[in-house]
């Protein structure tokens, strides 16, 4: 009989404990938050993450515990930035939190309403707060159809021999694109297999005597030479 009573009491205690866990949020209890309180927040070296978002994260983590802080809340704040590809949290007890961020990087820029914007390799638009180094990136012109641009750029970027030479990508119409290269050559693409056109382009792109490479007509190439 004693054994049965002990089992009964144990079940009652267990049930009470489970009810306690479902109705009480430990992380919101000040006593628990006082343990391993976050005093230092370290971001890895980021190039593009906006300072205002860092400040929001620091403010959100003030008075939080290294054990019980809300990761989802911090991730939601980071997702306000178009530059964030991934994040990892590392707890350095007793009071340091390292936030390691993987960023997208710019692939080019464009101008809209007198404001410069980057497009990054996640194909997200981001305001260019620093315009002093725009010449290091490809200029995008007349990008009115973003999906067509994305498809075009994904193919061209596979060819290092071409992508490294591009100064400007200009959308013309439908599937028509022009390139302006860093050496001032103009390349006119046609509305057919882009891989085939780039293979042809590679035969002529390093010729310094050429000014225009016209590939608009399939199975025909028209070359204009420097005067």
Image (cartoon, helix red, strand yellow):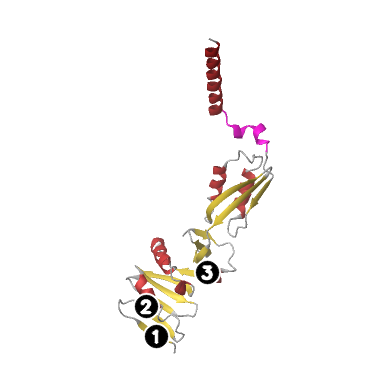
User: With 187 as the anchor, is 29 left or right in this view?
Assistant: right
Residue 73, image x, y percentages: 56, 43
166 magenta-colored: no
Badge 1, how many Cα within 10 Å: few under 14, some, many 20+?
Answer: few
- N-terminal of the pair, mark 1 or mark 2, is 2
Q: Nearer the viewer, residue 17 or 81?
A: 17
- Disc 2 secondary structure class: helix
Residue 197 drawn above or below residue 144: below
Q: What element carries label 3?
A: loop
Q: Name the residue under label 3.
A: 137
| 100 and 179: which is toward the camera | 100
For disc 2, the marked residue is 200
- Residue 60: x %, y % from top left: 62, 43
Residue ID at (65%, 36%):
33
The residue that appears at 53% across and 25% down in the rendered structure is 18
Upstream in sequence: badge 3 or badge 2: 3
- Magenta part of the chain: 24-35
């Amino acid at each position: 009989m004693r054994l049965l009573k002990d089992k009964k009491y144990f079940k009652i205690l267990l049930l009470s404990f489970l009810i306690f866990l479902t109705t009480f949020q430990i992380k919101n209890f000040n006593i628990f938050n006082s343990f391993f309180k976050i005093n230092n927040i370290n971001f890895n070296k980021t190039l593009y993450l906006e300072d205002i978002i860092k400040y929001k994260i620091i403010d959100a983590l003030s008075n939080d515990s290294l054990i019980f802080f809300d990761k989802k809340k911090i991730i939601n704040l980071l997702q306000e930035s178009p530059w964030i590809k991934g994040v990892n949290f590392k707890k350095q007890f007793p009071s340091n939190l390292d936030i390691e961020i993987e960023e997208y990087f710019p692939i080019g820029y464009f101008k809209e309403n007198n404001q410069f914007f980057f497009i990054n390799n996640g194909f997200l638009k981001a305001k260019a707060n620093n315009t002093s180094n725009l010449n290091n990136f490809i200029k995008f012109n007349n990008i009115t159809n973003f999906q067509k641009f994305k498809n075009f750029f994904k193919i061209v970027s596979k060819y290092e021999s071409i992508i490294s030479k591009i100064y400007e990508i200009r959308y013309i119409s439908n599937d028509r694109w022009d390139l302006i290269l860093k050496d001032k050559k103009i390349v006119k693409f046609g509305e057919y297999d882009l891989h085939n056109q780039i293979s042809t382009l590679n035969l002529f792109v390093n010729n310094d005597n050429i000014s225009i490479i016209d590939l608009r007509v399939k199975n025909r190439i028209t070359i204009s030479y420097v005067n």
